Image: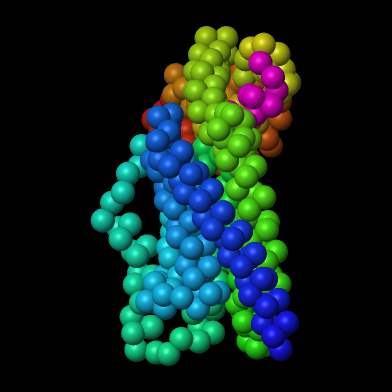
């Protein structure tokens, strides 16, 4: 028994030491992010808040393992409920740097406030872990649906953070199962793995960020670079389509368009997808349909087949389908509505 108690104290001492170190590293990471001057600053501030919450959580977890300061440990689940909203607000600020906080964002305080109220009237139990797990999963889904990252790098960062939320939910679920089985927090194997994994992640994340490399610096640099680059490519694309009118070529493809501009095909494709929210072929056809509408109004007496060929379409069926997809009407119906009956040509 004495040996068991000594081994337990040694095990708990090692675990709490790692928790203290990870808390210190999290606090350093939070200070580093809070003092970054690069854009998007608000996103860095929210990520700093996330690491500050991790630092506080790890300190409170060490106190819980040692059965110290129950008044402070009481706040541990509340801090855990604050993590998903802080991560969501970080992602939103990264994808929309111009969007600040609004009164509507106060709704994100509802889950931790509800947990506080529940704990005041109910005894502690598995519902605390269940609420935290539900919050992590729901916010992961909410991020996927509501955060519209404008660049490929931003989308990759969003998926990485969503995976982080889901991984935390799975780990919390495993810890809850162990606790329900009678294991104490200080003997949770899942908690040990979580702490070790987070410790390694923190060391890597902090060192690479301080050296301006690694995931955070890479993603944020790519977000800024992709945003600026996409704007430049968008301007070049629109200018080229207006001046050169390459869409008159019925064989125009994204590869041919990229060659004309001297740009990588992927850059052209991603810019059109991100900036115009449509495929390249649909975007090209949009220029053709605008020209078709102009020609119909300018020369309504001409047959639609002739107009179709002048706009870069090769077949009547494709012309009719594209015209209706983009305008909601067939070419004939659009001409009847926008041209006088006397001037409209027969089908």
**Quarter occupied by the C terminus:** top right
Q: Residue at x 68, y 35 (%)?
A: 318
Q: Residue at x 54, y 25 (%)?
A: 225
Question: Is residue 140 positioned above or below 30 on the image?
Answer: below
On the image, which quarter does residue 315 sit in? Answer: top right
Q: Main secondary structure of the magenta part?
A: helix
Question: Is residue 100 positioned above or below 22 on the image?
Answer: above
Q: Is residue 238 at least partly visible in the picture? A: no
- Residue 94 drawn at (x, y percent): 46, 40
On the image, which quarter does residue 252 sit in? Answer: top right
- Residue 265 drawn at (x, y percent): 70, 23
Q: Residue at x 53, y 75 (%)?
A: 66
- Residue 138 drawn at (x, y percent): 52, 66
- Residue 331 drawn at (x, y percent): 54, 35
Q: Which range of residues does the magenta coloring cover?
A: 263-273
On the image, which quarter does residue 233 sit in? Answer: top right
Q: Is residue 328 left or right of residue 163?
A: left
The residue nearer to you, when weighing 81 against 291, is 81
The magenta stretch spans residue 267 = yes
Q: Residue furthest front?
A: 2
The magenta stretch spans residue 72 = no
């Amino acid at each position: 028994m004495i040996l068991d108690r000594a081994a337990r104290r040694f095990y708990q001492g090692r675990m709490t030491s790692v928790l203290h170190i990870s808390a210190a590293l999290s606090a350093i990471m939070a200070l580093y992010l809070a003092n970054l001057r690069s854009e998007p600053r608000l996103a860095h501030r929210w990520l700093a808040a996330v690491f500050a919450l991790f630092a506080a959580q790890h300190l409170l977890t060490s106190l819980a393992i040692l059965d110290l300061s129950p008044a402070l440990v009481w706040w541990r689940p509340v801090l855990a409920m604050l993590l998903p909203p802080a991560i969501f607000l970080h992602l939103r600020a990264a994808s929309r740097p111009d969007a600040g906080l609004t009164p509507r964002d106060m709704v994100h305080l509802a889950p931790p406030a509800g947990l506080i109220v529940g704990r005041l009237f109910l005894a502690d139990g598995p519902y605390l872990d269940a609420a935290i797990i539900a919050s992590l999963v729901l916010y992961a889904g909410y991020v996927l649906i509501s955060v519209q990252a404008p660049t490929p790098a931003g989308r990759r960062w969003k998926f990485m953070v969503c995976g982080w939320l889901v991984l935390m939910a799975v780990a919390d679920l495993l810890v809850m199962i162990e606790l329900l089985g009678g294991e104490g927090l200080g003997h949770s194997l899942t908690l040990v793995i979580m702490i070790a994994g987070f410790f390694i992640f923190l060391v890597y994340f902090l060192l690479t960020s301080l050296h301006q490399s690694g995931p955070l610096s890479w993603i944020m640099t790519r977000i800024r670079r992709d945003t600026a680059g996409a704007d430049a490519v968008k301007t070049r694309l629109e200018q080229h389509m207006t001046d050169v009118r390459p869409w008159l070529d019925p064989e125009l493809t994204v590869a041919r368009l990229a060659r004309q501009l001297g740009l990588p095909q992927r850059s052209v494709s991603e810019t059109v997808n991100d900036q115009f929210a449509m495929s390249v072929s649909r975007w090209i056809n949009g220029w053709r349909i605008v020209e078709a509408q102009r020609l119909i109004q300018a020369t309504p007496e001409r047959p639609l087949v002739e107009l179709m060929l002048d706009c870069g379409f090769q077949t009547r069926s494709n012309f009719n389908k594209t015209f209706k997809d983009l305008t909601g009407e067939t070419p004939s119906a659009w001409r009847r509505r926008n041209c006088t009956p006397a001037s409209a040509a027969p089908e």
